[in-house]
Image (cartoon, helix red, strand yellow):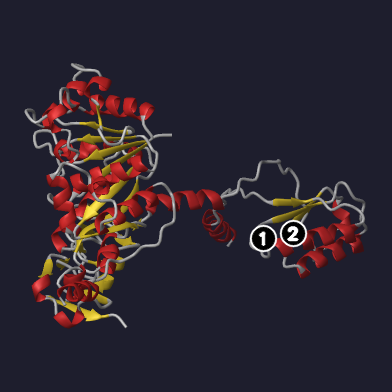
Amino acid sequence: MHGKADSKAGIARQQVRLRGRSYVAFVFAPAVPIVDWLSEIDATLASSPGFFVGKPVVLDLSSVDLSQSAIAHLVGSLEQRSIRVLGIEGVEGDRLVASMPPLLTGGRPCVITRTEPQAKHEAKPKTNSLLLDSPVRSGQSIIFTEGDVTVLGSVGSGAEIVAGGSIHVYGTLRGRAMAGVNGNSAARIYCQKIEAELLAIDGYYQTAEEIDASLRNQPAQAWLQGDIMRITPLI
Amino acid sequence: MAKVLVVTSGKGGVGKTTSTAALGAALAQHGQSVAVVDFDVGLRNLDLVMGAERRVVFDLINVVQGVAKLQQALIRDKRLENLWLLPASQTRDKDALTDEGVGKVIADLRTRFDWVLCDSPAGIERGATLAMRYADEAVIVTNPEVSSVRDSDRIIGMLDSKTVKAEKGERVEKHVLITRYDPARAARGEMLGIDDILEILATPLIGIIPESQDVLRASNVGSPVTLNDATSAPARAYFDAARRLTGETVEMVVPAERKGFMNRLLGRRAA
């Protein structure tokens, strides 16, 4: 019997694997009077609500001398502000009851590094659109295979725009526009006035002669419906 | 502070040389000191329009190559003492021009004059690119027809990319000058309208020069139209354009057909 139970316990012990993991916690060091300190927390929350949500928070009570009920009230006040306290340090263990966060020791100070701005920096080089804020002149060739091209102005007769994605022209499109050159058949060409010499999407093209005369000078878009290029007015 | 202005168009025969001479003479009559420089090496014409063809000794190429000094090559106008011409060479071609050489000449001209007007050759090759290379401002001469407008669009693109100013991230100030505008044909809808041209070029207008026999008559006698007959319609339009170049605000007048008035005048004389 004993042996059996031992072997069972042995198996169970093996299954419990302990892993170490460290988190950076915000440490709150309340100061007296606690009411003033809480109003400062409120001011912080007013400027950036949800700042402490989901972040581990530790109360450091070493600089104040609070009774058991005062600690309970402080933890309750923080909970009302959606700040959940992970642990308490700097206080004798007998001041804490079971309903309170546990006593922590051995915390080491560290610098809090903000991760959000770094994430933004990483996102920036991934731009997949090109914005041109001046007209594209005759003889100019804009080639941008990474994504969309937007032109704030007209594309002159004899100019050329080649895009991996869609092409948007906020002006008159008089030149050539080639969208979806990397095989993106979902790419489209939009323009405020269509007088294009040639439109192409993913290799399918139409020349000026084939574009319906009734569309001329109107806002229009071109897209692929299977193997057929469709050019329709924009509202 | 001298201003270097290139008169350019891309297309030939639209009136670059006529406009350079007319604007130069108009600015000079406003008291500015002006040098007009012919960049059309091998096909020079500005000396003829300025009436200085028989006084050419040295030319732009000689100065660029260091054979002659700038003051030896500059020809003073006989009618206006603050108007000067730097002629092109007729025997050489545009390959004789070098970037540094042109830069030096332009820098030298800047120290001597209020305005340096560069008459660009047609095309988009070496001659045209070097004429616009050091410009602060540009007058793009355009006729009201599609081929001329498209070539002008191309030239504007080059002014925005191939000039020293553009390479420094600055802008060459650009103006469109519409020449050979025929009010009668415009009324019949046989020409591009002013609005259409400006819509295509997206560049401000500096003047509209009406089609006129006065222009041909003036160049035949070797005189800028603004000197030959200052009261003629094209001369007045060039004077207005020159005043706009100096920063004045002058109301833009679209030339209208004056047939009715002329008919009345002629009719009365006949009676």
Label 1 sits on a secondary structure element that is loop
In percent of the image, x 89 and y 61: which residue is there?
A35
Question: Are the numbered discs 1 and 2 placed on the same chain, yes or no?
Answer: yes
| Residue occupying the far left of the picture | B91
Q: Give left or right: position of B26 versus A112.
A: left
x, y percentage for residue B197?
A: 25, 64
Category of crowding for the residue at label 2, using alpha-carbon neighbours closer than 10 angstroms: few (below 14), some (14–19), many (at least 20): some
Asked if labels 2 and 1 touch by Cβ distance under 8 angstroms, the answer is yes
Q: How many marks?
A: 2
C-alpha distance separating marks 1 and 2: 8 Å
Residue nearest the observer in this picture, A62 or A205? A205
Q: Quadrant of residue A136?
A: bottom left
What is the chain identity of the residue bearing mark 2? A
Callout 2 secondary element: helix
Q: Which mark is residue A44?
A: 2
Residue A217 as seen in the image, left or right of residue B96: right
The relative height of residue B33 versus residue A137 in the rendered view (above or below) is: above
Residue labelled with disc 1: A51
Image location of residue B259, percent across then percent down? 20, 73
Residue A110 occupies quadrant: top right
> Which label's residue is closer to the chain start, 1 or 2?
2
Residue A230 is labelled as none
Task: Give the amino acid type for the residue marked by disc 1 in the picture.
Answer: Phe
Q: Residue at x 12, y 69 (%)?
A: A204
Which of pointers 1 and 2 indicates the residue nearer the eye?
2
Residue at the (25%, 70%) spot, across then down: A188
Image coordinates for residue A178, horizontal then vertical, percent: 19, 63
